[in-house]
Amino acid sequence: MGSRAAQQRQEARQLAARLSAEGVRNVALTWVDNAGIARVKTVPAGRLAAAAERGVGMSPVFDVFTSDDAITASDHLGGPDGDLRLFPDLDRVTTLAAQPGWAWAPADRYDQLGLPHPACQRQFARRMTEHAATAGLELRMGFETEWVVARAPAGHQAATGADEPLDYPCAGPAYGMTRVVELSDYLRDVTEALSVQGIDVLQLHPEYAPGQFEVTTAPGDPVRAADDVVLVRETIRAVSVRHGLRASFAPSVVAGAVGNGCHLHLGLYRDGTSLHRSPDAPWGLAPDAAAFLGGVLGALPALLAVGCPSPASYLRLQPSQWAGVYQCWGVENREAALRLITGAPDDPDGGHAEIKTFDAAANPYLAVGAVIAAGLHGIESGDRLPEPQTGDPGVLGVRERARRGIVRLPATVTEAADRLEKSAPLHEAMGEVLHGAVLAVRRAEEAHFAGSEDDEIAAATRWRW
């Protein structure tokens, strides 16, 4: 143990020296709370070795922060007592291309005795990934990040965005080349910054809503995928600021309009072979892949409390807007909550699945960990996928949906939280402390916005993510 600690100290010192030589003066250490907000402590680059050895202090109360910075409490967390230590992941230290003089690292949280904090979402994601590996499964995950860009108000006077009209810097049509032309310098800088930081961009394009874009990044192991999406968002935010713009990743930027999703893509492999490429199996899914996806589909009502955590999330979750509001799956069906993507027949890595309901208010570590937990439970329980759905369930009558076994997913945070509270598999996977903290934040968010109009919810949360 002592030799390992000494080796880490030496690695941290060498890394700090390299960062200093590159002109880095500060390192941002981030974790994401249960309201989906990326919180931060920063250290001078020269203190990185000390941070790696002893951690950086922070309060456990952040696990019960809400998106508006109010503080609630669970049975295990809340109040001024206690302390945790943030330990940077030295393997993920990244010099930030759009923030000169800065580097970034995600952090794991431990108590003062060096034991893992039971509510650390990043360690939860790693634990679930290891459980999958024990079962012989490798998961590759990736996110699609959607955001809306607007011109920043003069002097940034409207900090909350509650009243100012949105001033879009591009006026082109949905998915139109016009938007790329109008913001070509900005989009070039986004992709260049991500590339310099080691993020493999698969594609970037205009989306449906005014000022909306989407970037898709390459898949990786689940923890890395969650790290990447945090880095992607903050990089887009930094590039936006340098262009006099603001980026919103909120689920609902304008009430009644198409919102921002953050779709989660996942592929399953065993011994390096895709489980989405079994030629003799229905839909090409090997039995474990079908059972895994069956577990995810069955758990979706509870998973919404993880992947759609804000009252603003449910402004986005509307039928016939490709948000996936019905508990069904389909082959290349963008209205299904769970979409099977077949990919090119000659591409061994082409097949995978997409969860369309999730948005960027979600803690990505919590999201990937909960999905893995649901999928592993599906394998253990021998879950099966029902028949896939075609077309838009939203245009079907109530009786026809009932005949097909299609039900509406939760329409409020409270409904989703109720389902999470009753989910024994997710409770067991998260543990009492993390599960209780998530539920406490969900209840507090819903109570805070009780009686609020849709446009008030959208305006209040517009610039929180």
Image: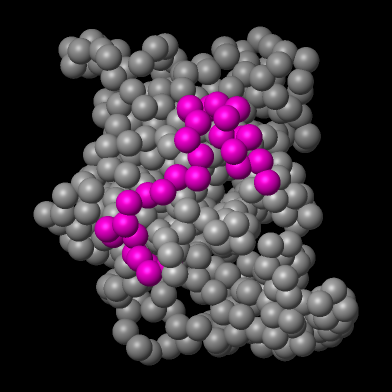
Q: Quadrant for the N terminus, please.
A: bottom right
Judge by depth and name the residue closer to the eye, 175 or 378.
Answer: 175
Provide residue 10's location: percent of width, then percent of height: 86, 82
Q: Main secondary structure of the magenta part?
A: loop
Q: Is residue 366 above or below residue 72?
A: above
Q: Is residue 6 in view from this perspective?
A: yes
What residue is rendered at 70% in x and 73% in y? Answer: 102
Q: How is the image coloured?
A: one colour
Indicate the quadrant where residue 391 lies. top left
Task: Write the residue at 63% across / 67% down.
Answer: 106
Asked whether residue 385 is drawn in magenta, I would say no
Residue at 32%, 67% in the rendered image: 68
Quadrant the C terminus occupies: bottom left
Residue drawn 33% across and 23% down? 320
Percent from the top left, x then y, of residue 285?
60, 20
Q: Nearer the viewer, residue 336 or 180?
A: 180
Q: Picture coordinates of residue 296 (x, y %)? A: 46, 35
Residue 157 sits inside the magenta stretch: yes
Relative to 31, 33 lies left or right: left
Q: Looking at the image, can residue 379 be seen? A: no
Residue 82: image location, x then y, percent: 43, 88
* Nearest to the observer: residue 425 or residue 276: 276
Q: Residue furthest front?
A: 154
Q: Residue furthest left?
A: 451
Toward which corner of the image does residue 197 lie, by quadrant? bottom right
Vertical order, 2 against 434 (above or below): below
In the image, which residues are magenta? 156-185
Give the side of residue 464 with respect to residue 409, left or right. right
